[in-house]
Image: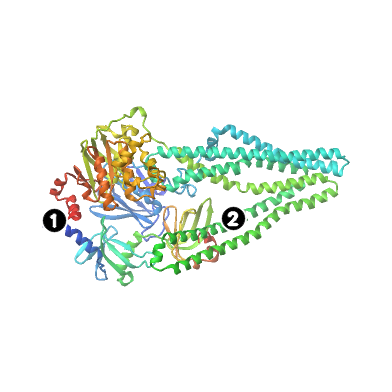
Amino acid sequence: MILYYSIPHKLEEIIPFEENERIYYAVPFDIDDKGNWIKDSYLVVTTKKIHVYDGEKITNTIEINRCSKAKAEAKVGGGILVVTTEGEDTVVVHYSAKHLSRYAYIARGINILISGRFEEVESSEYEKICPKCGRAIPGTKNCPKCSKEGGFIKDFLKMAKPYKKDFFYVFFLMVMAAVTTLLNPEIQKHLINDVLKGNGGMKQALVLILIMFSLSVGIVIVNILKSNASTRLGAKISADLRYALFKKYQELPLAFINDRRPGELLNRITSDTTYVREFMEDVFCNLFAVLFIFIWDVLFMMILNIKLALLTFIFVPIVVVMILAFRRTVSRIFHLQWRKLDDVSSDLQDVISGMRVVKTYGREAAESARFKALSDDFSETQRRNETFWAIFNPIIAFFMGMGSVIVVYFGGLDVFSDKMSAGELYQFITYTLLLFQYINWMSWLPRELSQLTSSLERINDILQQDVNAKDEKDLTDIDIKGEIKFDHATFGYKSYQPVLEDINAVIKPGEMIGIVGASGTGKSTLINLLMGLYEIDDGNLLIDGIDIRNINRKSYHSQLGVVLQETFLFSGTIIDNIRFSKPEATYEEIVRAAKTANAHDFICNTPDGYNTYVGEKGYSLSGGERQRIAIARAILTNPKFLILDEATASLDTESEYMIQKALERLTEGKTTFAIAHRLSTLKKANRIMVIDGHNIAEIGTHENLLENKGIYYNLYKAQIG
Amino acid sequence: MAENDSLNIYEKEAEEMTALKKITAENKFERTSGGFINLTFEGVTYERVKVVRLFPFTDANKFISIRQNNDKAKEIGIIEDLDELNKETKEMLEEQLRLNYFTPVIEKIYNIKDEYGYAYFHVKTDKGECKFAINMASNAVTKLSDSRLIIADLDENRFEIRDVNALTQKERRKLDLFL
């Protein structure tokens, strides 16, 4: 994301620079005092000052050393930059949602300058609209249209490189297809001129027919081979890309995954790779053949009869325009139809999943009426569209045929005046038909190519991400004893928004720490850091005195047990899910683990026992049952270090008791972090850590904290009385 | 005694949340030099209050909630109808609403171009002329009613079309794709 736009000369000239002063950030803002759009207006932050430029003059200047804080406040459809000077908040600029995250960085940059440091803030977020051409960027770093490096061809060649052999085979078949297609009319000419009009005998006719027959068979065979080869190639490429993407997703830091919508990441694996395959199958396999045929087709036509050829070519632009216009309308009206269908199905889904509510409020009739209206609307649109299609499709076909009518007329005149032979005319007509057929095909090309470009861009965007993986050699294996030390640890998911600041604590081996605090204060974040899912920004997190960044992840995670509030089970059987943490576990180990987790009995009561299929995400089990399976999963590895995130929340009292018991068995003598809203579940905790305001507000034993009469005291009183 | 105190704090808070207090013309709003407003209500002065629309789409000027400026943003009171206040106060509040809400209303559609999954709008709004792009595959267009639309662009700016039927036939055809 750009934080330093190139500013107009006029503005550059009027900024009064002092010595050692230079511009740090320059970003546009797009809303004026009256709340109207404004153009060419910038906020400029220098080493010492903040200037507001309205397009003509500097309207406001704030000295940074007078400020105590800068904040980018998000509002509905926009935001404002607010600075605090001498305790007074002042609106500096107002901007639309376009610049929301940009100003979050600027505010952070100003705050750094206020604190007397001179680091510059950089943003790794991508622009959504290309600043050069104004087109939307499909989730990639560079605009596919504007990226200089001849993007597409390079990307395509890079993708194709490992499949060189297959590509050459397809290419060879394409040339064969072109040759056989073009040869056929030539033979037909000879048949007409030499045999039918000339004095050729039966023998010659048979030879020619035989050649024509073998050419036709040849075309069919070449085409079959060609489609086969390119389908295979496409499937191979897309399977390899899918695998490469999946592997990359697992290597990428969680921060990258969290920055993107899950659907989008899913799409890159499914839709984008599918598109590459379809392109290979439908477009690429014909691409060169068509171009090849097209060029020769045009050449042959001109050689045969230049006047007639030029006459036909006049028709080409007309037909192209018509095809494009028709296609535009068709895609428009069918997009409309698709949207209406979407309305119908989403309404249907809404009502069916909310059936109980509809019935209890007696709204069946009203809902039916609404559905009928939507459904009628859809069917009316559908009817209109089909009518349009039925009328205009033949008309287009007719116009495309018009070219050959003209050829027949003028060519016929030429034949009568002996300027052309009948065979040549026949050959010419065939070439004309081919010409229009391929023009139709080629008019799809720009669209297909651009879609492929976007898909390749999106795929490469992921594949080219740097994973700053540490060298295996620098990492140590660990045998966890359980001492954990936070040393000035600071972390935020977004660089400009710290969630935990300056956390300091030492946890002794075997201690159980209860973590409490209001939602959104960073409890789960603390646990994410302990799980090694994110790396802390500043400070250290030491496990048994070793920096967590230098510990081999595999050895660390194999000794870590985690039970979360929302238990995630993979679709599969109970045994698969328990075994997930330790695939080589024996039946006995699994049954023991399940017994310790109080899961054995309910498992026995299912008809399929441990082989019971749990359904997608385990939804065929109750929350308590899922939780106990997760505990069994954690027990199986005999972890040295345990993390429980609200493991017993949202359970009924009986299952809570069972799980509490199971957890007690599990946590005995092990370093444990447990988040809980219900303080009663933390009775066994050695110490309680209260997180508030991005920091550890209180830490100590239950009794200590009650004596302190702080946050914990208030929470405890409110819950237990 | 102390135990009861903290219990009472929560109880009182919960109780207070249920009260619906009305702010009328008599309550004093003041501009701050930084472009915000303070409110004096029931003898207490609240600095830099937040001004929130409760029905931004259906009745933008009715039921305006005035809230404290802190993380909890507790409600101070509700203004039932902005138009019933005196001119000066109304202006002050409208200024704040302008800062808090930016939803340009589309008055005229010059052009809509769709290209490879994105649609590019060039429109005239009540805030001036502008261009924006939407993703056609996502649900960028929300129907508030049969004729009223909210369009969210790629940056999550929101544009409103008050009445589709007030547009010309030509403009409607351009918009057809999204209706």
Q: To which residue does mark 1 refer?
A: B3
Does the image show residue A124? no
Q: Secondary structure at mark 1?
A: helix
Does the image show residue B59? yes
Residue at 57% over, 43% down: A279
Three-letter amino acid code at disc 2? Arg
Question: In the drawing, does residue A483 fall left or right of residue A465?
Answer: left
The quadrant in which residue A331 appears is: bottom right
Chain for mark 2?
A: A
Residue at 36% over, 35% down: A586
- Find residue A328 and name its label: 2
The foreground one among A535 and A702 is A702
* On screen, residue A105 above or below A159: below
Q: Secondary structure at mark 2?
A: helix
| Both labels 2 and 1 in a single chain | no
* On screen, residue A28 above or below B175: above
**Label 2 crowd (10 A; few <14 / some 14-19 / many >=20):** few
Chain for mark 1?
A: B
